[in-house]
């Protein structure tokens, strides 16, 4: 973040100049306006952290300016300057939303104290907003379920990328968890305490996209009755996540390029640009190289956003993660829908691991939630599964066993099968669990139950 920018509004040029000097000595950047009208023009084109305004000015007075600021910039603090003895004006300003007031003649030591308090209050408000956006959500890399090699490879790259300020392009099929990975990168970055702001470039109508991304000023088009904060401004100091960037209209790509290269945006209807400090993370399921060849995506923008490219693998390439994901979603949905006693038998997981999941993790989660909601009994059965999952069950996994007349120990059979699977998988627990159609956690539990340990001489 840059130094705080403080706007001084007063029709007395000598007082403005003295106050500018005092503000600069505090390590802040001072802007000046000679009237309320000029102040509003400045606010429309410049990022400002605090406004200090005189109460009595020709034309628009300080109270009227305060009311306009409250309407257009509700979080922006305002300090009012009033004449000595005009306590009524000060009380009126506080009731209208002023942060504090200073009486003339100005005591600059007192002004410095009030300014610091106002800036600290503003910072606190911004931090609270950022933290509220993350409340009750877990966005570390540990929130991404799975231990398959393709996934771990991406997570390792993402963890290194998180520590940098470089732009990141996340590619992957729909439903692979691109936004979850973007949030994890932000949560592990130096910007973690600042906002993570998302915008889906394919979900907003083309004619509204520029205003959503960059904001607009009052009166810039029909219906623009107030200044609008764009997503890029809202992410100042944090991360801007551009989901489905391949859908961004070509005419906006050049403006996004300016943001990426120069850190500047231009509001709709504003003649001036303003600086913002954001890290860009983009995501797409589309082939951007093909879009470049077709003239639908700018090549220079592509190279700017793909400094660090990450490719999320589809779920069909993460077969060993399916059972763990299914168990995770089952437990979460069971709690969500108030069915704590519902059981998902481990053998049924074979049906999930055998399906190719064209909709990826999202499809798996939706399938589990439907089962939890619609299962009629206390235990999910194969008849509760949709037909395509019942048909996915591997016939090679079935056994035709006869119980001998003298009976048989079920535990001995189970121990023998688990030991056989471990040996066939060279004691790789993940592979052995897949052979048995159970989760790795279930396998470890049964290994401990039967006292199974890796045999001497095996790798």
Image: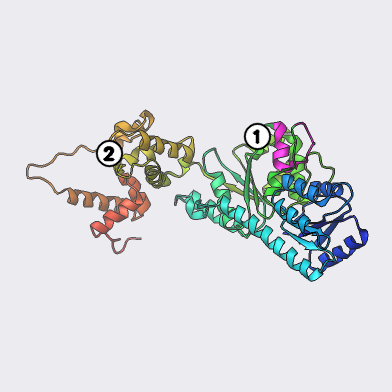
Residue 171: which quarter of the image?
A: top right
Q: Would residue 195 appear left or right of 103 to someone viewing this image?
A: left
Q: Residues within 10 Å of mark 2 (few under 14, many from 20)?
A: few
Identify the residue position indicated by label 2 in the image. Answer: 378
Q: Give how far across and how far down residue 285 sits, in percent.
A: 59, 38
**Magenta stretch: residue 211 in it?**
yes
What's drawn in magenta, residue-wise? 206-222
Q: What is the number of callouts on the image?
A: 2
Q: Would residue 187 appear left or right of 234 to someone viewing this image?
A: left
* Residue at point 78%, 57% (across, down): 80
> In what element is the residue under mark 1?
loop
- Determine contact: label 2, label 1, CB under 8 Å: no
From the viewer's side, name the closer residue of 270 and 396.
270
* Residue at point 31%, 42% (across, down): 342
| Picture layout, residue 444 above or below residue 115 | above
Residue 201: which quarter of the image?
A: top right
* Residue at point 88%, 60% (across, down): 16
């Amino acid at each position: 973040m840059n130094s705080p920018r403080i706007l001084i509004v007063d029709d007395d040029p000598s007082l403005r100049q003295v106050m500018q000097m005092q503000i600069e000595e505090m390590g802040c950047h001072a802007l000046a306006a000679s009237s309320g009208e000029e102040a509003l023009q400045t606010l429309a084109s410049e990022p400002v952290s605090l406004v200090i305004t005189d109460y009595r000015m020709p034309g628009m007075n300080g109270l009227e300016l305060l009311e306009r600021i409250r309407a257009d910039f509700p979080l922006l603090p305002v300090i009012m300057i009033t004449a000595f003895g005009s306590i009524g004006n000060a009380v009126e300003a506080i009731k209208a939303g002023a942060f504090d007031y200073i009486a003339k003649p100005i005591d600059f030591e007192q002004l410095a104290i009030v300014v610091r308090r106002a800036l600290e209050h503003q910072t606190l408000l911004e931090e609270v907003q950022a933290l509220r956006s993350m409340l009750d959500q877990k966005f570390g890399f540990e929130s991404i379920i799975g231990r398959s090699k393709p996934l771990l490879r991406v997570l390792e790259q993402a963890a290194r990328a998180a520590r940098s300020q470089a732009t990141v392009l996340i590619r992957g099929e729909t439903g692979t968890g691109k936004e979850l990975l973007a949030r994890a990168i932000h949560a592990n970055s130096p910007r973690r305490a600042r906002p993570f702001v998302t915008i889906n470039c394919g979900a907003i109508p083309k004619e509204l996209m520029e205003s959503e991304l960059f904001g607009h000023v009052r009166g810039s088009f029909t219906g623009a009755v107030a200044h609008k904060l764009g997503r890029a401004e809202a992410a100042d100091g944090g991360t801007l996540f551009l989901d489905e960037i391949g859908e961004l209209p070509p005419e906006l790509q050049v403006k996004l390029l300016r943001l990426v290269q120069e850190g500047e945006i231009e509001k709709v209807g504003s003649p001036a640009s303003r600086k913002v400090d954001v890290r860009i993370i983009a995501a797409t399921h589309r082939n951007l190289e093909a879009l470049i060849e077709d003239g639908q995506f700018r090549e220079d923008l592509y190279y700017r956003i793909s400094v660090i490219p990450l490719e999320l693998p589809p779920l069909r390439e993460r077969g060993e993660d399916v059972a763990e994901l299914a168990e995770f979603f089952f437990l979460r949905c069971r709690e969500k829908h108030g069915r704590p006693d519902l059981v998902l038998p481990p053998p049924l997981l074979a049906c999930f691991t055998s399906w190719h999941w064209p909709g990826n993790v999202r499809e798996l989660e939706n399938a589990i939630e439907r089962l939890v909601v619609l299962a009629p009994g206390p235990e999910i059965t194969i008849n509760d599964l949709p037909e395509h999952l019942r048909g996915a069950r591997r016939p090679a996994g079935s056994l035709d066993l006869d119980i001998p007349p003298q009976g048989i120990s079920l535990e001995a059979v189970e121990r023998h099968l688990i030991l056989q699977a471990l040996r066939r998988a060279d004691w790789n627990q993940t592979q052995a669990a897949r052979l048995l159609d159970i989760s790795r956690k279930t396998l470890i539990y049964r290994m401990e139950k039967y006292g199974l340990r890796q045999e001497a001489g095996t790798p």
